[in-house]
Image: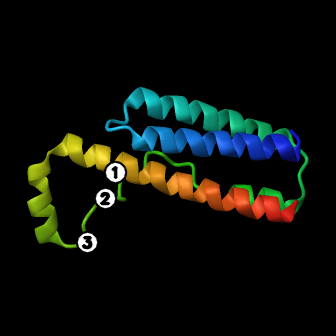
Amino acid sequence: MTEETLIKYLEFLKNECLRHQNDNIISDDEINQLKIEIKRFENKIKTAFFNSEIKQEISKMDFNLEEENHNRSKYKWFSFIGSFQGKEIQQQENRKQRFLKLYNDLDTSIFKIKSIL
């Protein structure tokens, strides 16, 4: 993998996050498709020869799509009020927040990697 390919792959992942995040519903299938792409990316990175700064920047990215604490309130009485929303709405909101966080991480990393190159 070359530096140009790395940037294109990161841009692709970033656009996928944005596309899924802008949908009203993020399905399990969409999450699985993105997980597959992330695994492909990670496998290609393992075999690529980049300098240590780039590898360090890539290792900082958090690709965990299963994290569920993005949309949780810190206060118990807010969570009681939020329980009326329903589990599905909370799950979708959490997924949107997770995709947004991954999008922002990718965007920041792309900028930093371009500045290294």
Disc number lying in front (1 or 3): 1
Q: Residues within 10 Å of mark 3 (few under 14, many from 20)?
A: few
Looking at the image, residue 10 lies above or below residue 107:
above
Q: Is residue 60 visible?
A: no
x then y, percent, for residue 69: 35, 58
Q: Which residue is mark 3?
A: 74
Looking at the image, residue 95 lies above or below residue 79:
above
Q: How is the image coloured?
A: rainbow
Q: Give me the residue at 14% from left, 45% from top.
A: 86
Q: Give me the residue at 8% from left, 51% from top.
A: 84
What's the residue type where badge 2 is placed? Asn
Considering the image in quadrants, where does the C terminus appear? bottom right
Callout 3: SS: loop
What's the residue type where badge 3 is placed? Lys
Q: Which residue is mark 1?
A: 94
Q: Are the residues at dot 2 and dot 1 in contact (C-beta closer than 8 Å)?
A: yes
Considering the image in quadrants, where does the N terminus appear? top right
What's the residue type where badge 1 is placed? Asn
x then y, percent, for residue 81: 9, 61
Q: Give me the residue at 78% from left, 37% from top.
A: 44
Callout 2: SS: loop
Q: Are the residues at dot 1 and dot 3 in contact (C-beta closer than 8 Å)?
A: no
